[in-house]
Image: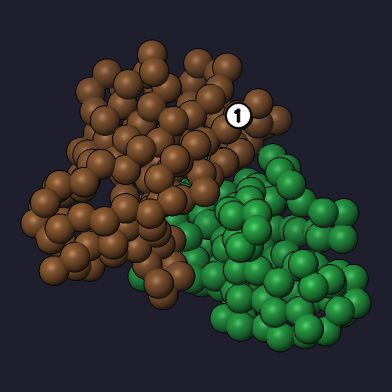
Amino acid sequence: DSGVTQTPKHLITATGQRVTLRCSPRSGDLSVYWYQQSLDQGLQFLIQYYNGEERAKGNILERFSAQQFPDLHSELNLSSLELGDSALYFCASTPQLAEGDTQYFGPGTRLTVL
Amino acid sequence: AQKITQTQPGMFVQEKEAVTLDCTYDTSDQSYGLFWYKQPSSGEMIFLIYQGSYDEQNATEGRYSLNFQKARKSANLVISASQLGDSAMYFCAMREVHTGGFKTIFGAGTRLFVKA
């Protein structure tokens, strides 16, 4: 158990819908990262937050947005869902912003868009 | 552009033998971090080992060691004394500074099969 929690574990929804994925980092970790893992694109970095502020952005679609709240949990919002958004979404956390910080991953949320 | 290449889609190894999983990277940055993660069939991502670009010694963590050759831009993972539980997908990753934070890119992965 990495100490990072993600809910829900599974999510099945229809095209055009909107969903929210939730992540609670390890106790004391200030930074949260979101990743998408799909069969065709592999593991893709989406976005990073540190202490409530967005710090780095990767291949995140405009239909996707995220935020980190004062209690440090983070949410990833996916809207106007398409079939291709079906993937495993991971959240990871690190204590600070040091390059050598190990990212500990949550168990992931498996999103299926029908 | 930053890139991680894992050229071995699948590898077989006999139980108790050592195996090397290849990883090459491309970056123009001087400071970066290299990581290996294991993803079993259950899906979770498990951190294995880290090597900083300025570390002169190869990293080791138990049965895992990282063969870091900076000039060749390679960061191969060596697993000694393979166990059946090592059968999994293995990802090489590189973290770089990116606009005030860090961006991590992953390779396509190598699926390791350990034979009894």
Tell me if B88 is positioned left or right of A57 in this view: left
Camera-nearest residue between A80 and A65? A80
* Residue A87 occupies quadrant: bottom right
Seen at 78% across and 83% down, the residue is: A114
Q: Secondary structure at mark 1?
A: loop
Label 1 resides on the chain identified as B
A39 sits left or right of B87 in the view: right
Output the letter for the chain in green: A
Callout 1, which amino acid?
Gln
Q: Quadrant of residue B54?
A: top left
Q: In this view of the protein, can residue A102 be seen by the observer?
A: no
Quick check: B60 above or below B42?
Answer: above
The residue sitting at 28% across, 62% down in the picture is: B113
Q: Is residue A27 above or below residue A86?
A: above
Residue at 73 percent across and 43 percent down: it is A57
Q: Residues within 10 Å of mark 1 (few under 14, many from 20)?
A: few
